[in-house]
Image (tube, rainbow, N blue to C red):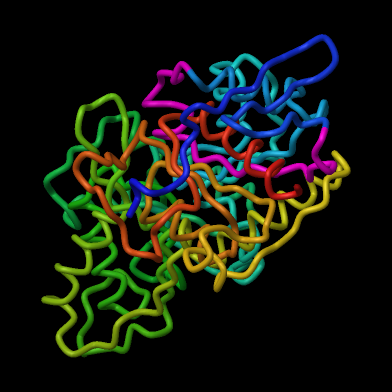
Amino acid sequence: MISAMPTLTNVRFVRTSRNWRSQPPGRRCISTLLPPRTPAFVFDIDGVLLRGETVLEPTRNAFRILHGENPFNRKIPYIFLTNGGGVSEETRCLNLSRQLGFDIPINRYIQSHTILKSIAHRFHDKHVLVLGGRGNTLKSVAHSYGFRKVYNPLDILAWNHAIYPFIDLTEEEKMMHGTHQDLSKVKFHAILVFHDPRNWGLDIQVMCDILRGNGFLAEPTSIHSATDVEVIFCNPDLLWKNEWEGPRLGQGGFRKAWEGVWSHLKMGQNDPVITQLGKPTRETYSFAADVLREVSDELDVKLTFGSSDDVGTLGRSSSNIYMIGDNPESDIAGANLAGWNSVLVHTGVYDPRHRPSLPESKRPTLEAKDVEEAVRLVIHEEIKFTR
């Protein structure tokens, strides 16, 4: 049961003139312990560090600890891993740097769609449809990743308003998204759901048209197989947390809505090739591990990768990597699959008052009320682990 998980109750770090020490009840001072190994952190953002645009109060204290005010007297490696997105990594880093009050290098920030950089070469000369974001923002991001022939649903709507007559584009949007190309003759090889779509109706309509036409927008004259059109979703989250009291529907909700419509329209056609990325998928956590390894090498911290068989069964993994998240479905489940440890905080999606227990696959190693407590608890656990 979650209530039996270790928490930070009665554990605090005390700064002295010489060092810090961990003072849980009845424990020895850190100076009598073996040299502890340094942990490495992977942080979710929404519901952990921020709630909407608001920085949660414990966040800045947590990063003071990571930047050197800790028992190791050194910088502790960390990266950000979010199922959010919608803009470039440069833009996101600038915004988060402004909010947190220190510079965040771009190599530490992984959005849900950052991993698409690694597959862009497969679609170098092929047409792709990009969903999500505002205006042409994600088209620009896709171009920066290496995709060359990129369209979004507003481009298609500007080409032929009849495809979804319930939206009227402004004159500015017509200028921005207009094309002289006959899009009915364009073969789309992939539909990339980068971020949460802004208009589910338009995007579901265009997706279904392309899939029923085996990559073409024109209404099919016969039933085609849709197996050569790849559909990639970057974020499986059904829910996410902002300033609103209750969780909001995310990209996972959009996928469920599209699947419901598609099941009634496909008329015996094969389903497309569907790839799900984002937390908790192995692909995303493997990508994050490579990024974290680079950051840790810069700080001369050695990473230890545990076994997924250990997590949940033994209570903790031998890994010194900790995922700090608020969503058991994505953050914690993914960490367990990767063989990492995890800390579930209570400032976001998960509320222990409403869900007092979790299945083993989504059960965290530790639990804390907020991110500062999570960081302090991890440091205490790593010190204890090396005794």
> 370 or 197, which is in the foreground?
370
Q: Quadrant of residue 91?
A: top right
Q: Would you place residue 368 above or below residue 193 in this image?
A: above
Residue placed farthest to the top in the image?
Answer: 17
User: Percent position (x, y) of residue 174?
Assistant: 33, 37
Q: Quadrant of the N terminus?
A: bottom left
Q: Is residue 148 visible?
A: no
User: Percent position (x, y) of residue 270?
Assistant: 28, 88
User: Percent position (x, y) of residue 51?
Assistant: 38, 26
User: Percent position (x, y) of residue 105?
Assistant: 72, 32
Residue at 50% x, 20% y: name it: 58
Residue at 70% x, 62% y: name it: 305
Q: Is residue 111 left or right of residue 250?
A: right
Residue at 88% x, 43% y: name it: 300
Q: Would you place residue 167 above or below residue 255 in this image?
A: above
The number of discs equals: 0
Q: Which residues are magenta?
A: 32-57
> Is residue 235 covered in magenta?
no
Q: Is residue 293 visible?
A: yes
> Is residue 47 covered in magenta?
yes
Q: Quadrant of residue 135?
A: top left
Residue at 46% x, 73% y: name it: 189
Q: Would you place residue 386 above or below residue 103 in this image?
A: below
> 57 or 169, which is in the foreground?
57
> 193 or 182, which is in the foreground?
193
Examine the residues drawn in magenta and state their main secondary structure: loop
